[in-house]
Amino acid sequence: MKRYDRRTFLKLSGASAVMLALSACEDEGFGGSGTPGTPDSGSSIDPSTYDPFYSGEITTLGPPLPEAPDSPPIPVIRDGRKIFEIINAELTRRKVQYFKLQYNAGLEHSIQSEMQMFVDYDTPSFPAKEGLKARMNGDYVDGMWAGFDEGGYGWGKGSTAFIRGIHHDCYGIQLDDYKEERYYLDRPYPANQAQFKALMDELEGKFNHAPDPNMLDSPEVRKYDIGITVADVQGKTYWAAYIMRTPENPTDDE
């Protein structure tokens, strides 16, 4: 049996307390409810002005989570808002200083639509061209646009570049039509406390950075909207999220 040193044991215990306190061990229905007060769409901000992943290459937030079969298991939660609350509580417990997540129902509805394509076709992976064609031929891309519009990201509506580039901000669904030429799910749902801790370490390492003194108007705390979904494909549970910088300017329609 694997033995943990005292520091690792305390970290896993802290994460376990957060998960057990908030999850209530329920396996709830796919999806979540809307959020009153979600900003309207219509912002004219160019995505490159606040998209931290804006580049010419498709990127991910990191490698798949490690296997840790002897770590205590955690229940599968299918409500995106509850998962957000668990992640947020763990970030608070860690005293994260430089970034803040806020739940966005529109982003959750958008990524649900994208994930639904993999569920309907019962595959975790497409050849890139076939996957893009399937997304365009179904109602999936319409659902994605509706979610972006609801969540305050309607400025990109109708843009093929936006809908393809969204995977710079996507965690769990990857589109690589340059090297591997695949469109695929790459994030199994964390099955145990060690995998949850690894996920939180990764998020903290990716986003929790002090302001850059060489950049004008670098925010003290960066704010991100997040929408999360969970689904089963071929008997395996996957999760995915859009994590996007919160638009700084409100819509002109307000």
Image (tube, rainbow, N blue to C red):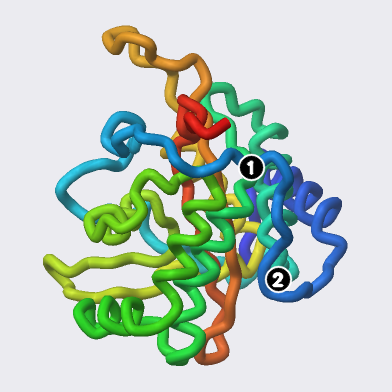
Q: Is residue 207 above or below residue 192?
A: above
Percent of width and height locating residue 248: 47, 26
Q: What residue do we see at 68% from left, 74% from top?
A: 30
Residue 60 placement, left or right of 55: right
Residue 29 placement, left or right of 158: right
Dot 2 or dot 1: first in sequence order is 1
Q: What residue do we see at 58% from left, 65% from top?
A: 229
Give, as a three-letter code, the residue at label 2: Val
Name the mark on residue 76. Answer: 2
Q: Is residue 187 above or below residue 40?
A: below
Percent of width and height locating residue 254: 58, 31
Mark 2 neighbour class, 10 Å CA radius: few under 14, some 14 to 19, many 20 or more: some
Q: Nearer the viewer, residue 253 or 101?
A: 253
Mark 1 neighbour class, 10 Å CA radius: few under 14, some 14 to 19, many 20 or more: some
Q: Is residue 198 visible?
A: no
Could you say whether the residue bearing mark 1 is in a helix, strand or loop? loop
Give, as a three-letter code, the residue at label 1: Thr
Q: What residue do we see at 26% from left, 81% from top?
A: 133
Mark 1 sits on what residue? 38
Mark toward the viewer: 2 or 1: 1
Q: Which residue extends farthest front?
A: 253
Residue 41 placement, left or right of 100: left
Percent of width and height locating residue 221: 52, 21
